Image (cartoon, rainbow, N blue to C red):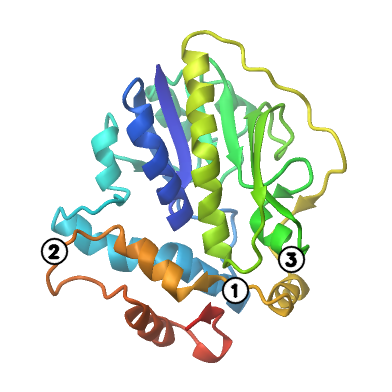
Amino acid sequence: MRITLLANRDLPSNYALNLLLPRLAKDHSCALFLSDKVGGKAAQHPDLQRLQFLEQTLCNDLLFPPLDRLDATGELLTFSGLGTWLQQPWRRLNDPNSEAGLSALSATRPDVVMSLRYGRILQPEAINIPLQGVLNLHSGRLPKYRGVMATFRAMVAADTQLGTTLHWIEDASIDTGRIVNTQSAPLDQRRCYLSNVLSLYDLSCASVIDAIDAISIHQDLESSQAEGPSDYFSFPSAPDLAAFQANGCIWADLDFLSATLQRYQPPAWDGTQLDVSKAGLAALYRTALNPEAAHCRS
C-alpha cells in the first residue's frame, strides 16, 4: 500500500517519524512531505520563540546539517537520513491546496495520507486524493483539546492525563473527524514540555501501524464521532504562557534534551559535532536567546 506522510519540520515530528517509518516501510511504500511551521504567522511572544528554537532551530540549523554533510548516523535519523525508508527524498509542502501542491500529492498516488503535526489545513480537494482517506494523529485527547499545543493545554490545566487521538480528516474543520482510537497515559507535571510531547509518540505510533495494516488488508476501522465538551485552542496568549510558568512548567529540561539529541550522533564523532552535552546546550542557549527569560532548567 502507498502511504504519504505529512509532518512538520520539527523535533517531535522527526522523533515520531523515526518510530513510524522503519515499520511502515517493511510492508508499504512511503513518501514524506514536510511543512516549515504550524500556522501562517511567525511566533511573536518570546516564550514561543524559545520553543521554536528548541523544536526547530537546534535540529534543522545546528545539529542535522553536519550529520547530513558527513553522512553520519546515530540511533535516531535526521529528516534526510530517514530517506532510507522512503521511495524518494522528503519534500517541502507548505501549500498543499494549491495547484502545485495538489499535483505533488497526487503524484505519490497515495492509498492513505497520514498526517502528524502537519502545519497546514487540508481542503476537500486534497482530502479526496488518497483512495482510503486521510488519518491524523492528534497530540491530545479529543474533543477536549482541539487545536495546537494540546500538551501545553493539559499541563496548564494540571490535567491528570496526556493522550493522543487517531482520527479521520473528513473536511477542512480542525480535529472533528471520526475517532479511530485514543491512547492515554498519566501526565507527569515533573517532566518538561518536550519530554511529555515526545512520550506521546512512544505511546501512540503502534496504534498508527495497526490502523494502516488493517486498512491494507481491507478491514474496516471502527470509528465514532467524538462525544463530550469540545474546546478549540489556538497558540497560547501571554496569560496562558504566564500560567504555564506559574505552574512550575518548563519547555525543556537540559538533561532530557541532551540525552535525546545525543541519540542522533554516532558513537564516535569528531570535532565537527555540535556539543549537545548539558553544558554545551546551556552555553548555546545563552548565546542564542535571552538567558534571564529562558525556560530551560540548567
Tell which of 17 and 4 is nearer to you.
17
Residue 14 - label: none
Tell which of 287 and 183 is nearer to you.
183
Residue at far bottom of view: 292
Q: Position of residue 71 (x, y in %)?
A: 15, 53
For the residue carrying disc 2, how many other residues have a C-alpha within 10 Å: few (<14), some (14-19), or many (20+)?
few
Q: Earlier in the sequence, mark 3 or mark 2?
A: 3
Give me the residue at 70% from left, 63% from top. Answer: 155
Give the residue type at disc 3.
Val
Residue 176, can we see it? yes
Residue 250 - label: 1
For the residue carrying disc 3, how many other residues have a C-alpha within 10 Å: few (<14), some (14-19), or many (20+)?
many
Residue 117, can we see it? no
Instruction: Tell me how far mark 3 sits from mark 2, CA to CA.
Output: 40 Å
Vertical order, 221 against 228 (above or below):
above
Q: Position of residue 282 (x, y in %)?
A: 40, 83
CB within 8 Å, label 1 to label 3? no
Task: Give the residue at mark 2.
Answer: 268
Q: Earlier in the sequence, mark 2 or mark 1?
A: 1
Instruction: Tell me how far mark 1 sits from mark 3, CA to CA.
Output: 11 Å
Task: Give the residue at mark 3.
Answer: 156
Q: Secondary structure at mark 3?
A: helix
Q: Is residue 28 left or right of residue 125?
A: left
Q: Is residue 34 left or right of residue 234?
A: left
Q: Position of residue 93 (x, y in %)?
A: 44, 42
Instruction: Tell me how far mark 2 sits from mark 1, CA to CA.
Output: 32 Å
Give me the residue at 33% from left, 34% from top. Answer: 22
Vertical order, 40 against 107 (above or below):
below
Closer mark to the observer between disc 3 and disc 2: 2
Give the residue type at disc 1.
Ile
Vertical order, 244 against 289 (above or below):
above
Give the residue type at disc 2.
Ala
